[in-house]
Image (spheres, grey):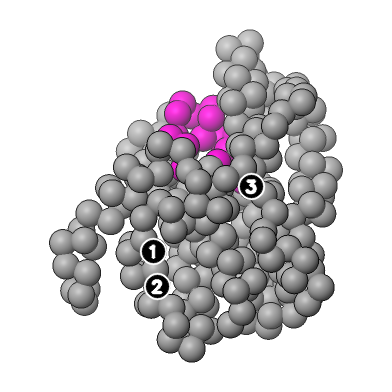
Amino acid sequence: MNNAIKDLLFRLADDELVLGHRNSEWTGLGPILEEDIAFSSIAQDQIGHAVANYTLLHESAAADEPLPDAIAFGRNEKQFFSSQFTELPIGDYAFSLIRHFLFDHAEMLRYELLTASSFAPLAALARKIKGELKYHVLHADLWVSKLGQGTEESRARMQTALNEAWPYALGMFEPSDYEAELVTNGIFSGEEGLQESWLEVVAPIIEKAGLTIPQASEPKYGGRHGYHTEHLQPLLDEMTEVYRLDPAAIW
C-alpha cells in the first residue's frame, strides 16, 4: 500500500472514530428520547465505519500496520489525521446538530466519489457505507429545517452554532500532501472538488432553514497534519483508558 492510500484511509477512519466518540456523549443526555437514541445510533455507525477503514488499512498493508484496535487506541494526538472539527466538545444540541449536518453531508459526498476509486477495496467499502450515510443526512436535514424555522430562540441558537462551526467545517477539506497522486491515479478526485459539491448541497438547505452562511471564514486547517486543538488528547486519554491497562489483552 502506498503512502497516499494510507493517508486517505487514516483521514477517513480518524474522523469517524473521533466524532463517533463525541456523538456517543449524547447517550442519556439527548433533549428528547428519540434524539438520545438517534445520536447513539449515529455514533455507533461512525465507529463501525472507522473500524472498517482501519481493517482495510491493516489488511492492505502487508502487516505493516497493526490490528484495528491498536491503530485506533495506540496513537497520540500528533499521530491522528482527523480534522479539528470532529474533536470539538459536543457543546449544546444546536452545535452537535449543525456539526452532524455539515459533517455527514461531506461524508456522503466523499463516499459517493470513492465508489469510483481505482483502489477496489475502498470502492467496495464506500458503496456499503454510502448506503448507511443517507439516513444520517435525512435526520440532519429534518432537524436543521425544523429548528431553523422554529422559534426565535431555536433559530438564534442554530445560527450561533453555524457561525462557530463553519470555519472548522471548512477544515474538513484540508488538502492532502498526496493530493496530486490521489487524483492522477484515480484513487480520489480531490478535496477542492468535494468542497465545491458540498457547498452546492448544504447552502440551499441552510438558506431554506432561514439561516445564513458566515462570510469570509478562514478554514481551520492543521488536523490532517497532526496539529489539533487542546480537546483531542483528553478525549483520546478517556477513549483509550481501558485499552492502555493491558494492550495485549484479547476481549
Examine the rendered structure and indicate whether residue 106 appears above or below residue 47: above
Q: Position of residue 232 (x, y in %)?
A: 40, 44
The residue where tag 3 is placed is 172
The residue where tag 2 is placed is 68
Q: Amino acid at mark 3?
A: Met
The residue stretch that appears in magenta: 85-103
Q: Are marks 2 and 3 in contact (CB under 8 Å)?
A: no
- Say what secondary structure mark 2 lies in: helix
- Say what secondary structure mark 3 lies in: helix
* Quarter occupied by the N terminus: bottom right
Q: Are marks 1 and 2 in contact (CB under 8 Å)?
A: yes
Q: Position of residue 173 (x, y in %)?
A: 69, 49
On the question of residue 161 being in view, the answer is yes
Examine the rendered structure and indicate whether residue 52 appears above or below residue 177: below
- The answer to whether residue 199 is magenta is no
Q: Quadrant of residue 213?
A: top right
Residue visible at 81% across and 73% down?
184
Structural crowding at the residue carrying mark 1, measured as other residues with C-alpha within 10 Å and reported as few (<14), some (14–19) or many (≥20):
many
Q: Amino acid at mark 2?
A: Pro
Image-based side of 86 in relation to 119, left or right: left
